[in-house]
């Protein structure tokens, strides 16, 4: 079982909200990890969006709109990236990552389509 | 402005070697751990290696352990990756990055093919 699991794709309409999940493997506690979120568009490197550990320990990337926000769902053992007011420019791949067992572990990525 | 500029990629035959470099500016390089992360064509991100700020600790992904060597020169604000015994599956864009700080380079393409 992968350490981090993301749905491979998600579609949503312009103006709607999209909730991207990053589920930790059973046995790992999402509450103990800081989850980092990245956006990547074709031909470009990943762009830092934000990090989230708790409501009191979070950081928005420089210049990242506030319609991108992070949270956790403890019952699902998952980190969540919420994008509100979807725009066509939000169409991209999104990756979550954590520092785990002396390594950066990346989720497989979610391809977000805005249509 | 933070800049991470990779170089050294190219076409190499299986079994060959390459050395990647990353020149950093715009942040206090000596304070941060640095990493190499790669992305095979059409695939997701894969962490390769990490070196702490003073080179005290070094970590590798299992897929490159024993073949790749990470190093840094804090006097030159530079990060390196020596890649030996290259395989076709090492073909990827290699990024110099500090994921915790949100710093990434533009990447350099390594192609391993006969």
Image: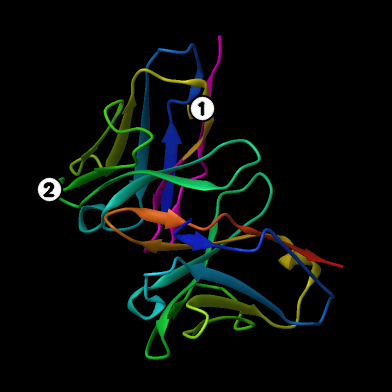
Left or right of B22 on screen, residue B9: right
Query: Which circle's residue, 1 or 2, is located before the other in the chain?
Result: 2
Q: Does the magenta segment cover residue B108?
A: yes
Instruction: Give the chain of mark 1.
Output: B
Span of residues in magenta: B95-114
Closer to viewer: mark 1 or mark 2: 1
State the separation of the CA atoms marked 1 and 2.
Answer: 29 Å
Q: Secondary structure at mark 1?
A: helix
Q: Residues within 10 Å of mark 2 (few under 14, many from 20)?
A: few
Q: Which residue is mark 1?
A: B89
Vertical placement of B87 versus B64: above or below? above
Q: Does the magenta segment cover residue A79?
A: no
- Image quadrant in which you'd find residue A14: bottom right
Q: Residue at x 76, y 77 (%)?
A: A86
Name the disc covering residue B56, or none. Answer: 2
What coloring was used for the rendering?
rainbow
Vertical placement of A50 versus A113: above or below? below
Instruction: Give the chain of mark 2.
Output: B
**Residue B69 screen position, x and y as percent:** 26, 31
- Image quadrant in which you'd find residue B99: bottom left
Q: Residue at x 61, y 43 (%)?
A: B43
């Amino acid at each position: 079982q992968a350490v981090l699991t993301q749905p491979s794709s998600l579609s949503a309409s312009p103006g709607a909200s999209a909730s991207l999940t990053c589920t930790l493997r059973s046995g790992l506690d999402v509450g103990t990890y800081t989850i980092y979120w990245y956006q990547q568009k074709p031909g470009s490197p990943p762009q830092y969006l934000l990090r989230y550990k708790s409501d009191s320990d979070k950081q928005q990337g420089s210049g990242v709109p506030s319609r991108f926000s992070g949270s956790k769902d403890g019952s699902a053992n998952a980190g969540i990236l919420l994008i509100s007011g979807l725009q066509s420019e939000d169409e991209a791949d999104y990756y979550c990552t954590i520092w785990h067992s002396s390594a950066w572990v990346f989720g497989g990525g979610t391809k977000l389509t805005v249509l | 402005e933070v800049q991470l500029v990779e170089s050294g990629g190219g076409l190499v035959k299986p079994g060959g070697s390459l050395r990647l470099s990353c020149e950093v500016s715009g942040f206090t390089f000596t304070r941060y751990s640095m990493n190499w992360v790669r992305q095979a064509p059409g695939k997701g991100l894969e962490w390769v290696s990490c070196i702490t700020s003073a080179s005290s600790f070094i970590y590798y992904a299992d897929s490159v352990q024993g073949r790749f060597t990470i190093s840094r020169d804090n006097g030159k604000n530079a990060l390196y990756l020596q890649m030996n015994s290259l395989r076709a599956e090492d073909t990827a864009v290699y990024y110099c990055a500090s994921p915790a700080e949100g710093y990434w380079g533009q990447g350099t393409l390594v192609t391993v093919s006969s």
